[in-house]
Image: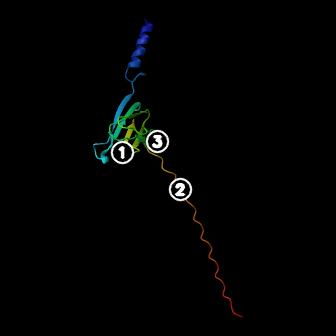
Amino acid sequence: MIRGALVLALLSQLLAPGGAAAQPQMVSIAIVDDPRPQDQWGYAPSMRRVAPGTWVTWSNNGIDAHSVTAGDGSFDSGVLNPSEGFSWYFDQDGTFDYVCSLHTWMTARLVVGTGGPAAVAPAPEPEPEQAPQPEPEPEPEPEPVSGE
């Protein structure tokens, strides 16, 4: 009898919301292009907020190839042909800016949990400054030769 109650208690914990067997959330984002003008192509929605523990799936609903490429390189779908999709699991807070690498005007942002600084590509290292070179000494003027 005690064993049955223990099993029942464990099952109720596992199946309860937030229990060990809680299902991760799933969110969809559409990639849209034609028949819209190119400047209106993009991700729908272009800004999305999700909880940590969420699977995000991008679906190419357009007629052109696209990609989903994080600015910091943390995820990249590669080329997605029409009707193809890409999923990524977000388990930690953060802000992720992403772009279509084939159409760079297509940009969007995903905020996970409380967010944080936007994940962007690191800035290139600045070129080291070269110390100014000293100017060469002027050559001395030849002295005039006197005629003896």
Quadrant location of the N terminus? top left
Q: Which residue is mark 1?
A: 106
Cβ–Cβ below 8 Å for labels 2 and 1?
Answer: no
Give the mark, 3 or 2, whose residue is nearer the N terminus.
3
The residue beneath circle 2 is 127
Front residue of 72/35: it is 35
Q: Nearer the viewer, residue 45 or 117?
A: 45
Q: Would you say 121 lies left or right of 63 here?
A: right
Q: Which mark is residue 73?
A: 3
Q: Residue at x 65, y 83 (%)?
A: 142
- Mark 2 closeness class: few <14, some 14–19, many ≥20 residues within 10 Å: few
Q: Earlier in the sequence, mark 2 or mark 1?
A: 1
Task: Please give the name of the residue rendered at 41% of the width and 14% of the height, measured from the top-left corner.
Answer: 9
Q: Which mark is residue 148?
A: none
Residue 41 x, y percent position in the rendering: 32, 44
Residue at image position (34%, 36%) is 29
Name the element at disc 3. Answer: loop
Toward the bottom, the furthest residue is: 148
| Comparing labels 2 and 1, the label whose residue is closer to the camera | 1
- Hey, what amino acid is under mark 3? Gly
> Would you say the residues marked 3 and 1 are in contact, meaning their CB atoms lie under 8 Å apart?
no
For mark 2, give the secondary structure.
Answer: loop
Q: Residue furthest right?
A: 148
Spot occupied by residue 124 in the image (x, y as percentages of width and height)? 50, 51
> Disc 3 to disc 2, how far (Cα)?
23 Å
Q: Position of residue 139 (x, y in %)?
A: 64, 77
* Image height of 51 relative to 131, above or below: above
